[in-house]
Image (cartoon, rainbow, N blue to C red):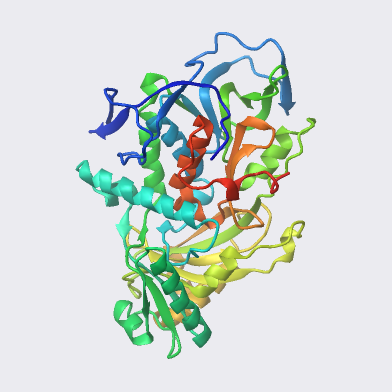
């Protein structure tokens, strides 16, 4: 159960669907508290906020206080929900509000979508490397279910999920090269099977049959999840934006890109934050969601400066490199692949107060083929502040590590492909305990956080969006939200 935070009135429900790029609405539907599949994912019972607001706010509270860097702007707009952050988390939360309720939504970002971690990832929606005993398992599993439901419904609407989302069912391989790895992989297959995820263990010979290009030696093996999928982050975000923008003519959606958030406006009577101040506008909202990725910690610190609120979101930037090779013929892949070591480094947790720079670089093999047929190799992990500069030494590490699993990559030199090589660098929002923060800021019932997904933003996006919307509307969350609460983790 999540705690109710905003006054609501009688529920109603509506269906939204797209045909030829146009959103249609069917309001002749009985209210139901069940979750249903739709073009935009699961449906939530609609609950109207007590104040319907669109356009300019007619009145403002007489008594307000301001926390931030600049004076309150004269230009103001009002929405039911204001979301800070236009990565995949922020945009999918907006989409869930728009398609699952009649609330109005504004999204504000200092840049544009896919300019952070979202646009720098490989786009895999995999379960093979997930641990069913982890606290993120149910959220990840639910989110994958919603992605698959979305892809199926897009197909049912006569569109191709590959063209719309870059969606394809590739299957995934978690591979190891030692006897110890093989023991771990057999155990993982058993765990996944018990958790109702199709998986099988592959011996060296069986792996060679599935993926001839990969080599793990005589003692190695693999866990194979045939139903795992991947998508293209840019295509998926473009589609989500298109859905969101289809609600703009109704006055229910607006984007404020290239606008730095500079402060929050707080009512001295209620104590709640009621507006987000940007470099150009004051955006009033009955609920505010901060989904700013690895920038969430510094942003919240700046916004709360000078107030009595004690909050440290603990989110740190964890830098990663990926190599993209266009028209790479020497290596052709049938499935996505990842080495066992990736799981160890992704899930590693560190004591609070650890110096960011004290952790050494980790490089683990990941290999996928994107929708354009490009080979994508990764990946690295390091704490290097907010730097997004390409490090050529890390690029070489990734190339050499991939060559240990794919012998064909040992034949050519990396310099042979310099013209066809691109490097993606992103900053994963890392939490020390390995779990995202999803929920309201303690003591502030209408200010929510949704950040800290590390490398699983795409993977957990739809489940996170569903959870946040349920929290704001006061509904029971589909997945238990308590492991992700800020209380005790950010205070």
Residue 377 horizontal side relative to residue 432, left or right: left
Q: Which picture quadrant has residue 199?
A: bottom left
Residue 278 horizontal side relative to residue 268, left or right: left
Which image quarter holds the C terminus? top right
> Looking at the image, how many numbered discs can be counted on the residues?
0
Observer-nearest of 322 and 12? 12
Q: Position of residue 143 (x, y in %)?
A: 42, 50
Q: Which picture quadrant has residue 438?
A: top right
Q: Position of residue 175 (x, y in %)?
A: 44, 76
Which residue corresponds to the image point at 19% horizontal and 43% vertical from the top-left?
Answer: 158
Asked if 62 appears above or below 359 in the picture, the reply is above
Q: Position of residue 177 (x, y in %)?
A: 48, 84
Which residue corresponds to the image point at 54% horizontal and 18% vertical from the top-left?
Answer: 77
Residue 40 in sight in this render = yes
Residue 281 in sight in this render = no
Residue 455 horizontal side relative to residue 316, left or right: left
Asked if 241 appears above or below 452 in the picture, the reply is above
Q: Which picture quadrant has residue 127?
A: bottom left
Which residue corresponds to the image point at 29% horizontal and 81% vertical from the top-left?
Answer: 209
Q: Position of residue 311 (x, y in %)?
A: 73, 40
Asked if 273 appears above or below 90 in the picture, the reply is above
Which residue corresponds to the image point at 32% horizontal and 48% vertical from the top-left?
Answer: 149
Q: Residue furthest bottom?
A: 218
């Amino acid at each position: 159960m999540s705690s109710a935070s905003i006054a609501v009135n009688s529920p109603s429900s509506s269906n939204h669907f797209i045909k030829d790029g146009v959103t249609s609405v069917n309001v002749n539907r009985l209210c139901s508290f069940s979750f249903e599949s739709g073009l935009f994912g699961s449906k939530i019972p609609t609950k109207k906020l007590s104040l319907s607001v669109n356009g300019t706010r007619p009145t403002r509270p007489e008594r307000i206080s301001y926390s931030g860097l600049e004076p309150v702007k004269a230009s103001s707009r009002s929405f039911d929900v204001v979301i800070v952050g236009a990565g995949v988390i922020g945009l999918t939360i907006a989409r869930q509000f728009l398609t699952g309720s009649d609330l109005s939504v504004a999204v504000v970002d200092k840049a544009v979508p896919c300019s952070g971690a979202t646009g720098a990832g490989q786009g895999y929606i995999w379960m093979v490397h997930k641990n069913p005993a982890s606290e993120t398992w149910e959220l990840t599993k639910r989110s994958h279910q919603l992605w698959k439901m979305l892809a199926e419904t897009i197909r049912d609407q006569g569109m191709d999920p590959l063209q719309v989302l870059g969606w394809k069912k590739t299957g995934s391989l978690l591979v190891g090269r030692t006897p110890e790895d093989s023991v771990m992989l057999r155990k993982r297959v058993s765990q996944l099977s018990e958790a109702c995820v199709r998986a099988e263990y592959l011996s060296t010979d069986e792996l060679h049959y599935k993926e001839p290009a990969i080599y793990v030696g005589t003692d190695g093996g693999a866990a194979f999840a045939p139903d795992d999928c991947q998508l293209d982050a840019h295509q998926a975000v473009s589609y989500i934006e298109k859905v969101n923008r289809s609600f703009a003519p109704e006055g229910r959606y607006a984007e404020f890109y290239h606008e730095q958030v500079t402060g929050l406006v707080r009512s001295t009577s209620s104590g709640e934050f009621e507006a987000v101040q940007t470099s150009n506008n004051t955006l009033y909202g009955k609920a505010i969601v901060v989904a700013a990725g690895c920038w969430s910690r510094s942003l919240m610190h700046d916004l709360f400066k000078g107030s009595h609120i004690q909050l440290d979101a603990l989110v740190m930037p964890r830098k990663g490199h990926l190599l993209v090779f266009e028209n790479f013929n020497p290596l052709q892949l049938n499935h996505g692949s990842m080495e066992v070591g990736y799981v160890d480094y992704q899930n590693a947790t560190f004591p609070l107060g650890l110096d960011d720079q004290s952790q050494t670089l980790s490089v683990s093999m990941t290999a996928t083929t994107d929708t354009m047929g490009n080979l994508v190799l990764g990946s690295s992990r390091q704490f290097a502040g907010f730097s997004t500069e390409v490090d050529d030494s890390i690029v070489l590490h990734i190339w050499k590590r991939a060559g240990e699993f794919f012998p064909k990559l040992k034949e050519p030199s990396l310099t042979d492909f310099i013209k066809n090589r691109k490097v993606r660098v992103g900053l994963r929002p890392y939490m020390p305990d390995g779990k995202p923060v999803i929920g309201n800021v303690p003591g502030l019932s209408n200010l929510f956080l949704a950040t800290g997904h590390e490398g699983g933003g795409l993977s957990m996006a739809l489940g996170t969006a569903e959870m946040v919307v349920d929290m704001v509307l006061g509904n029971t969350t589909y997945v238990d939200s308590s492991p992700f609460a800020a209380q005790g983790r950010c205070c």
